[in-house]
């Protein structure tokens, strides 16, 4: 299987013979464009990043033709082990050795560390795996792009739907104790209060914990209408399973996953995940275009893609198009092209990259189907609401990014 071959190699050179040469004046450093995918290859986030992230970026390189402006495109990847210090060290090593752009970057703590290195080295970082809205707020940089989603958009979609449509206005948080969980709880809390809801309490759990029993008992005892899980990865899956075992949904409390990947739904199964409300930037079965690309991805990975995979592909294509248009891989010129070019593809319609590095696009609120509603493999979600880009993301008037002129 492609996935096994992918994990056995540390360097991939994507080439194509069917290629039209570009002008000799193109300025490409080191006579090649080098992309590094820095991700979780073996830890609790590997099922929603890892080989999938690398595969999506490789697909983009192959579809682009393997070269840009007559120069080859090289892809390498590494496992950051969910440790910000390892991520920063690898990023510094890569940038110093000629890597032009780092992609993937799941785990918000790692992403924040890497974007600081990118700023220091004046090299590009494009984030699809991580969600913390800090990345384009107080942690923004002129060389980083937050592409697929963020905690502000996730919180806006799910909290608004549950409060406005389901009339569920008392909340209790179980929050993963790292940058992503903190940002997700903070953004959700702000939105809940703005909508007239109340946060009864919250409990933080270690990111790598496998046993959520004591935390769930506190949430159950709170009598909050919504038990909101502000976490991700295997920890989120374990927490949902435990909540079912404790009978929390049967007791009348609603489990809200503030970040739910399609792979989480698949791992849980519809029997346990049914009815859950989730917000996402992408669903494979939404349009003919999403279906066509997703089926290609599935042939390589053995599963359908989620918004991180789709974002990795889309953002890599935009990056390579920007190099072609600019005639160079120089950071400033490429970033200027990226920020001035509308994004229209299977992932986003009329998307654009703002001055704070946030790529704004429509987001979607879905409900997980019941087993009886699902008619074919990976038929998991029903669209409940579309959130226009202008409403999905933090308005620039509220931004603390130093790049935003007010």
Image (cartoon, rainbow, N blue to C red):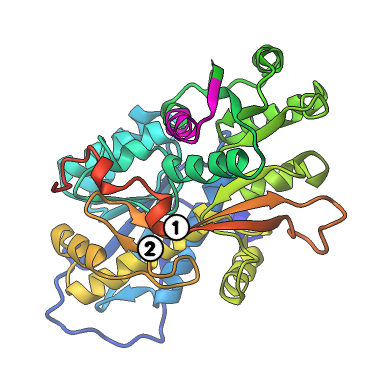
Kindly report the secondary structure that dominates the magenta region of the rendered protein: helix
Q: Position of residue 37 (x, y in %)?
A: 40, 50
Which structural element holds mark 1?
A: helix
Q: Position of residue 271 (x, y in %)?
A: 83, 42
Q: Is residue 360 left or right of residue 92?
A: right
Q: Is residue 334 left or right of residue 84?
A: left
Indicate the quadrant containing the N terminus: top left, top right, bottom left or bottom right: bottom right
Place residue 285 in its image quadrant: bottom right
The verdict on residue 186 being magenta is yes
Relative depth, front residue between 143 and 140: 140
Q: Is residue 357 left or right of residue 251?
A: left
Residue at which label 1 appears: 312
**Badge 1 local density, few (<14 within 10 Å), some, or many (20+)?**
many
Q: Position of residue 58 (x, y in %)?
A: 46, 63
Q: Which residues are magenta?
A: 184-199
Labelled pair 1, 2 in contact (Cβ < 8 Å) = yes
Q: Position of residue 200 (x, y in %)?
A: 56, 17
Residue at (80% x, 20% y) in the render? 246
The verdict on residue 180 being magenta is no
Relative depth, front residue between 65 and 379: 379
Q: Is residue 175 left or right of residue 61?
A: right
Residue at (41% x, 58% y) in the render? 389
Question: Label for residue 222?
Answer: none
Above or below, comparing residue 122 to residue 201 in the picture: below
Question: Label for residue 316?
Answer: 2
Residue at (65% x, 29% y) in the render? 226
């Amino acid at each position: 299987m492609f996935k096994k071959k992918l994990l056995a190699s540390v360097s991939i050179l994507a080439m194509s013979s069917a290629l039209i040469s570009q002008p000799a004046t193109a300025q490409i450093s080191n006579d090649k464009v080098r992309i590094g995918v820095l991700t979780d290859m073996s830890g609790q986030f590997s099922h929603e990043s890892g080989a999938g992230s690398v595969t999506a970026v490789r697909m983009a390189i192959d579809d682009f033709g393997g070269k840009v402006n007559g120069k080859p495109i090289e892809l390498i990847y590494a496992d950051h082990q969910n440790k910000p210090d390892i991520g920063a060290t690898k990023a510094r090593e890569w940038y110093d050795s000629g890597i032009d752009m780092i992609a993937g970057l799941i785990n918000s703590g790692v992403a924040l560390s890497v974007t600081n290195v990118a700023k220091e080295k004046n090299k590009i970082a494009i984030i699809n795996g991580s969600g913390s809205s800090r990345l384009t707020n107080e942690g923004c940089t002129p060389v980083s792009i937050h592409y697929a989603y963020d905690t502000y958009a996730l919180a806006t979609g799910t909290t608004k739907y549950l409060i406005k449509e389901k009339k569920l206005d008392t909340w209790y948080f179980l929050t993963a104790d790292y940058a992503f969980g903190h940002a997700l709880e903070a953004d959700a809390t702000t939105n809940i209060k703005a909508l007239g809801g109340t946060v009864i309490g919250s409990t933080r759990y270690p990111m790598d914990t496998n046993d959520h029993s004591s935390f769930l008992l506190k949430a159950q005892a709170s009598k909050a209408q919504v038990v909101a899980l502000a976490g991700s990865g295997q920890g989120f899956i374990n927490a949902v399973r435990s909540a079912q075992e404790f009978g929390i949904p049967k007791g009348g409390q609603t489990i809200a996953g503030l970040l739910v990947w399609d792979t989480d739904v698949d791992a849980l199964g519809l029997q346990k995940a049914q009815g859950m409300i989730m917000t996402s930037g992408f669903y494979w079965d939404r349009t003919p275009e999403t279906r066509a690309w997703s089926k290609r991805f599935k042939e390589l990975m053995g599963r359908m893609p989620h918004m991180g995979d789709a974002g990795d592909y889309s953002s890599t294509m935009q990056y390579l198009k920007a190099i072609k248009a600019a005639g160079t891989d120089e950071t400033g010129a490429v970033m200027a092209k990226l920020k001035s070019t509308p994004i229209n593809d299977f992932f986003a319609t009329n998307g654009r990259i703002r001055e704070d590095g946030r790529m704004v696009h429509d987001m979607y609120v879905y409900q997980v189907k019941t087993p009886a509603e699902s008619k074919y493999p990976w038929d998991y979600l029903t669209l409940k609401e579309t959130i226009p880009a202008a409403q999905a993301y933090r308005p620039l008037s509220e931004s603390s990014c130093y790049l935003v002129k007010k």
